[in-house]
Image (cartoon, rainbow, N blue to C red):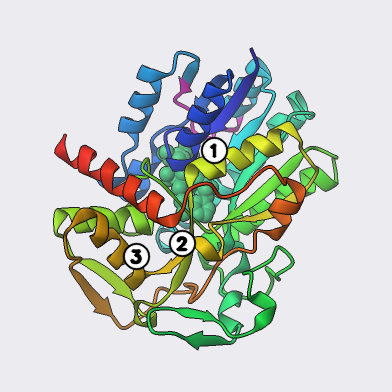
Amino acid sequence: MKNIMVTGSSGLIGSEVVTFFHAQGFNIHGVDNNQRAVFFGPPGDTRWSQKRLSETLKNFHHHELDIRNRQDILDLVKEIKPSGIIHAAAQPSHDRAAAIPFDDFDTNAVGTLNLLEAARQNCPESPFIHMSTNKVYGDRPNIIPLKELETRWDYADPTYSNGIPETFSIDQSKHSLFGASKAASDIMVQEYGRYFGMPTCCLRGGCLTGPNHTGVELHGFLSYLVKCNLEGREYRIFGYKGKQVRDNIHSEDVARFIHAFYLNPRSGEVYNLGGGKANSCSIIEAFKLVEEFSGRGQIYIYMEENRIGDHICYYSDLTKMKLHYPGWNITKSLKQTIREIVQSWQERLQK
Ligand SMILES: NC(=O)c1ccc[n+]([C@@H]2O[C@H](COP(=O)([O-])OP(=O)(O)OC[C@H]3O[C@@H](n4cnc5c(N)ncnc54)[C@H](O)[C@@H]3O)[C@@H](O)[C@H]2O)c1
């Protein structure tokens, strides 16, 4: 039975990857210290997810480790010599990063280096898949000319009619401290591919979502929006008339791509991983979709000021992913994804 290691295993992406690879017959070592609860307080607690994995998956082994602890990470990778490392542990919020710059950089940049070096020393042939983010592009997508439609913004420049490609510059724009720490790790992961020839890739996520997200105001907008809807709580829109566009991808489709890369790895690659134009929506469009499934009107308040560095319109160009991995495609529509998130919160809020 092959071993794989998943960091951030209690989080949205980590837990989905654990479940997906377990179903394919892997022995899984998950690393998570519930740091999300430290970053975001009790609403960010992921113990429920860890418990679910431990109770339902017999070949899942939880390790209560902090990826910032270099020696612990070196020891674990040396001991288990995984056939693949999926790195999904992070401080994931760009707004939160400004208040905790050391924790943010130590987790996102240094934690990633700890894992890369542990992999190079112990299992350099094993695919290393890093969850990066579209925030590495900073606010540069905002300089693309836009057109204002009734319920959303869209690109006016036909160059971007399929979305943002991987060739888009990550340089000379405002990233937030989070975007900067993630850009550091993104480049380091590419470098371990290019310099050492290791099979690494960076997945620059748009909005990754799904029923297992523990959405909070500062991270996980769809999950949080649904939670507000079901609890009858006010959702705060920050600027851009609520027409800001996000592309949403179900975490299962993320896990499916990670598995495809694991089976046929390349070196030092970068992919923009989102739902693409077909799975994109604005915030006010999201309200309508959620209302359809929950039957409840969304309560919200509009704040004039946008979040610093926030994208006005972002959707990923999926062309390169599909070219390199033609067997992969989006399998969950936005509607289906929202329906699952609504169902999941309905169950979790009843407990
Ligand atoms: N969800 C999104 O919309 C999105 C978008 C773009 C990129 N990403 C990236 O994908 C990855 C996964 O995101 P997610 O949504 O699953 O986040 P998440 O917060 O749900 O999961 C991350 C997990 O990592 C754990 N963790 C954090 N710091 C740790 C540390 N120092 N040691 C051990 N464990 C630690 C947390 O407890 C949490 O369970 C992150 O790298 C994130 O930046 C996410």
Q: Secondary structure at mark 1?
A: loop
Q: Nearer the viewer, residue 336 or 113?
A: 336
Label of residue 94 in the image: 2
Residue range of the region highlighted in magenta in the rendering: 62-70
Tally the marks.
Answer: 3
Ligand 1 is within 8 Å of the C-beta of the residue at disc 1? yes
Q: Which residue is mark 1?
A: 68
Q: Position of residue 145 (x, y in %)?
A: 59, 87
Disc 3: residue Cβ within 8 A of ligand 1's nearest atom: no
- Residue 122 included in the magenta stretch of the image: no
Which amino acid, by three-letter code, is at mark 2? His
Task: From this view, report whether residue 192 is shown above or below residue 54.
Answer: below
Measured from the top left, where is residue 16 in percent x and y? 47, 35
Instruction: Tell me the element at label 2.
Output: helix
Q: Specify the amino acid type for callout 3.
A: Ala
Between residues 138 and 168, which one lies in front from this camera angle? 168
Nearer the observer, 168 or 150: 150
Q: Earlier in the sequence, mark 2 or mark 1?
A: 1
Quadrant (top left/top right/bottom left/bottom right) for the N terminus: top right
In the depicted structure, whether residue 51 falls above or below residue 238: above
| Mark positioned earlier in the residue sequence (3 or 2) | 2
Is the Cβ of the residue at disc 3 closer than 8 Å to that at disc 2? no
Q: CA distance from mark 1 to mark 3?
A: 36 Å
Q: Residues within 10 Å of mark 2 (few under 14, many from 20)?
A: many
Quarter of the C terminus within the rendering: top left
Residue at 35%, 77% (x, y): give it: 242
Name the dominant secondary structure of the magenta segment: loop
**Mark 2 near ligand 1 (CB under 8 Å)?**
no
Which residue position holds label 3?
Answer: 286
Whole-percent x and y of residue 111? 58, 41
